[in-house]
Image (cartoon, rainbow, N blue to C red):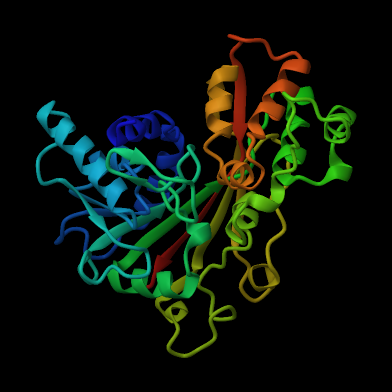
Amino acid sequence: VRLAHLASLDLRSSYPPALYAHVLAYLDANPPSSTATRPRTVLDLGAGPGLSTFPLAPHFDRAIGVDPSLGMVTAARDLLTERISAGEVDEGRIRFEQGTADSLLRVVEDESVDLAVAGPSLRRRSTLQSGQVLKHSLHSTGQAAHWFDPAATYAELARVLKPGGAFAFWGYGECFFPSRPELSELIPPYSGGTLGAFPPLFRSLLLCPRSDHPTLRTGKYWEQPGRSIVEGLLVRFPLPLPSVFPSASSPAQRFDPATFHRSFFLRSASSPAPSLLPAESSASSPVETSTHPLLLVKHWSLSDLTAYFRTWSSRHAYQEEHGKDPVEGIVSALRERGLREGEVVEVGWEVAVVMGRKRK
């Protein structure tokens, strides 16, 4: 399977423009102080094949995508070459480099970035090299904030952001079916893998498995703590508050707590925002939060869902240990709950966005 083809699939699983508009509105509400004299620059951390780099690039003079995987950087560069040849992108406006969020010294200049972003790919975690597919592993195609070392990442952001520059990290929870609650209830137990939480259908499959229903408990095969952090809508990913990073030399001193914000795009208009950690909800420095309607929605068939489930790292770890594919079980369960071959169903994900600014 060609890497460029898989990268193109990643780009088709893109985030809606409303997400980028939300982040850009935050940035533009109080632009960095040196924007008028230096090129307006966006930095995409864990860029993968450019899932967010390409959509954000038209809003900036320069865009830099950084990813730890050389294979993904190669794929992104190949896509960039194709887009330049097609006249879709100006040469020199976008570049992709190998690197990590906590080590950007040879990639990004001091105080040169207006906005730094990070968000995971909807294809889930896969590490790819040119010309082949490798097993799913810790790093993602679009390595997201829930895998970053917070202190080291904020230290680098304090270096590369312009005074007043912003960061925005986003992540999404588990998928669900907005108009099909009978299907939605199958996903948490399949992904979480707690036997007691399984609906009767699942419990019967676990106790009396058939050849087409392998054991479905995949929860323990997720890498942690990243999985639980993103499933909790990034609440456990800390903002650079002095109370969290108390050292006088910590990067927290370089950021402005008054600008910190957590946005939640939830499945229901009446859904409350998740409870914040004590450091963020204290009366002395409460972090501002806001809730918004659901924005990340896809319309997928059963075959699309099957392909999506097969990108989960927990599925690959499970298959390595047991020699069988747990996706067959969840697909069979969805069929038994009424999802027909060829039927297109709405799939949604709750999204969280964590934003803040460097001091001016």
Please say if 30 is above or below 179: below
Report the front residue among 187 and 179: 187
Report the front residue among 198 and 221: 221
The percent coordinates of residue 67 (x first, y second) are 33, 54
Residue at image point 65% right, 55% down: 228
Report the front residue among 38 and 10: 10
Residue at image point 61% right, 46% down: 314
The percent coordinates of residue 130 (x first, y second) are 27, 42
The percent coordinates of residue 198 (x first, y second) are 84, 37
Report the front residue among 8 and 235: 8
The quadrant the N terminus occupies is top left
Q: How many marks?
A: 0
The percent coordinates of residue 180 (x first, y second) are 73, 21
Whether residue 360 is visible here, answered yes or no, is no
Residue at image point 76% right, 31% down: 186
Q: Quadrant of residue 202?
A: top right
Q: Quadrant of residue 324?
A: top right
Whether residue 37 is visible here, answered yes or no, is yes
